[in-house]
């Protein structure tokens, strides 16, 4: 997998290029991008070849092509790819577009979908990946599956899941990272209210987040057990936990993930092309 095609060199297209370059130093990129300034970044910073207006050339060049345009642009792209797509390999990172959408236009069994989050920019995304059931030559499909898992892990950590669970990964990861940003902002504002400036308070809150992640990774304890460990009898932490529970913190976060997952499910049923 040396030659990677990328259609749409926005946030995600570039995040994958950066991750792939870090992971496989020798990757070559071929890019289709309609915004000139974005293409300048692709060419200037990633030595990409510009295939804009030449989907056939892109697919001849690429071992695997990543489709990274916004959902409303995806139909146009897959229609134009269709005539050159036979037997080609694709990974789509378009939210809300099911595998069936690509299968209608792309004449190939080698399709995969993934749902990362914006931490792909730092190769720290939690990525859900799904495939259609193996078709045609099973051995070749297994090679493709391995290539895709390798490719998406350049954006962070990848989990293969059935397609029916993609909306849950959207709620937990794609959208979930925004809920973590909301929590960090809230923590920082708490610091401000208690007398610390916002910048310092934000830096402390981010360090608390990193510390929490390190503890969670370093132990098999559940988060609930860790909360109990941090709460000393009649202490400061349990006083704060009571406030969070009175404000229905757990229920609110559960609902946020659930609402995002429902919205993703709804989008998968809508053809906005
Ligand atoms: N950003 C996230 O956190 C995130 C997380 C999970 C999944 N995703 C998915 O990743 C995909 C990309 O998101 P993004 O944030 O990277 O979007 P983005 O920054 O808008 O990048 C998409 C780029 O593709 C260009 N483009 C559109 N149609 C094109 C075409 N026909 N040919 C060539 N280039 C074209 C866009 O140009 P214009 O701006 O002119 O349209 C834009 O520069 C989306 O489908 C999104 O659902 C994003």
Image (cartoon, rainbow, N blue to C red):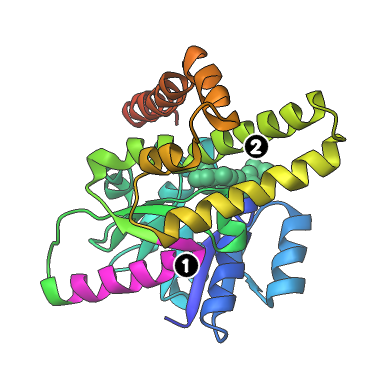
In the rendered image, the residue lying farthest to the front is 233
Residue occupying image coordinates x 27% and y 49%: 103
Badge 2: residue crowd in 10 Å (few <14, some 14–19, many ≥20): many
Q: Is residue 259 above or below residue 70?
A: above
Task: Say which of 122 and 266 sits in front.
Answer: 122
Give the secondary structure at mark 1: helix
| Res. 268 image quadrant | top left
At x 25%, y 44%, the residue is 163
Q: Which mark is residue 56?
A: 1
Residue positioned 37% across, 55% down in the render: 82
How far across and down, in percent of the image, does residue 44 sit?
Answer: 77, 72
Residue 271 visible: yes
Identify which residue, 242 or 253, lies in the foreground.
242
In the picture of the structure, the residue carrying the numbered disc 2 is 184
Residue furthest bottom as drawn: 26
**Quadrant where the N terminus is found in the figure:** bottom left
- Mark 2 lies on a secondary structure that is helix
State whether the magenta stretch is mostly helix, strand or loop.
helix
Task: Name which residue lies at 50% across and 63% down.
Answer: 155
Say which of 164 and 54 sits in front.
Answer: 164
Region in magenta: 140-157
Determine the CA span between mark 2 and mark 1.
46 Å
Ligand 1 within 8 Å, label 1 CB: no
Q: Tell me residue 262's x, y (percent).
A: 36, 24
Return the residue nearer the eye: 128 or 143.
128
- Residue 244 horizontal side relative to residue 267, left or right: right
């Amino acid at each position: 997998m040396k030659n990677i095609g990328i259609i749409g060199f926005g946030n995600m297209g570039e995040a994958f290029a950066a991750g792939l370059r870090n992971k496989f130093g020798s990757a070559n990129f071929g890019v289709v991008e309609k915004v000139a300034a974005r293409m300048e970044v692709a060419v200037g910073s990633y030595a990409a070849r510009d295939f804009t207006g030449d989907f056939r050339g892109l697919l001849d060049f690429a071992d695997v092509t990543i489709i990274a345009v916004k959902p409303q642009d995806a139909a146009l792209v897959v229609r134009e790819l269709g005539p050159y797509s036979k037997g080609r390999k694709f990974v789509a990172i378009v939210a809300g577009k099911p595998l069936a959408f690509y299968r209608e236009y792309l004449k190939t069994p080698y399709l995969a979908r993934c749902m990362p989050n914006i931490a792909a920019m730092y190769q720290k995304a939690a990525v859900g990946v799904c495939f259609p059931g193996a078709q045609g030559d099973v051995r070749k499909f297994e090679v493709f599956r391995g290539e895709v898992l390798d490719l998406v892990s350049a954006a962070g950590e990848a989990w293969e899941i059935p397609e029916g669970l993609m909306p849950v990964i959207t709620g937990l990861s794609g959208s979930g990272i925004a809920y973590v940003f909301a929590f960090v902002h809230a923590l920082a504002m708490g610091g401000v209210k208690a007398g610390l400036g916002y910048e310092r308070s934000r830096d402390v809150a981010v360090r608390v987040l990193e510390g929490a992640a390190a503890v969670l990774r370093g132990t098999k304890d559940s988060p609930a057990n860790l909360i109990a460990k941090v709460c000393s009898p009649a202490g400061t932490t349990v006083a704060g936990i009571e406030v969070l529970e009175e404000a229905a913190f757990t229920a609110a976060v559960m609902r946020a993930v659930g609402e995002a997952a429902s919205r993703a499910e709804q989008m998968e049923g809508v053809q906005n092309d």
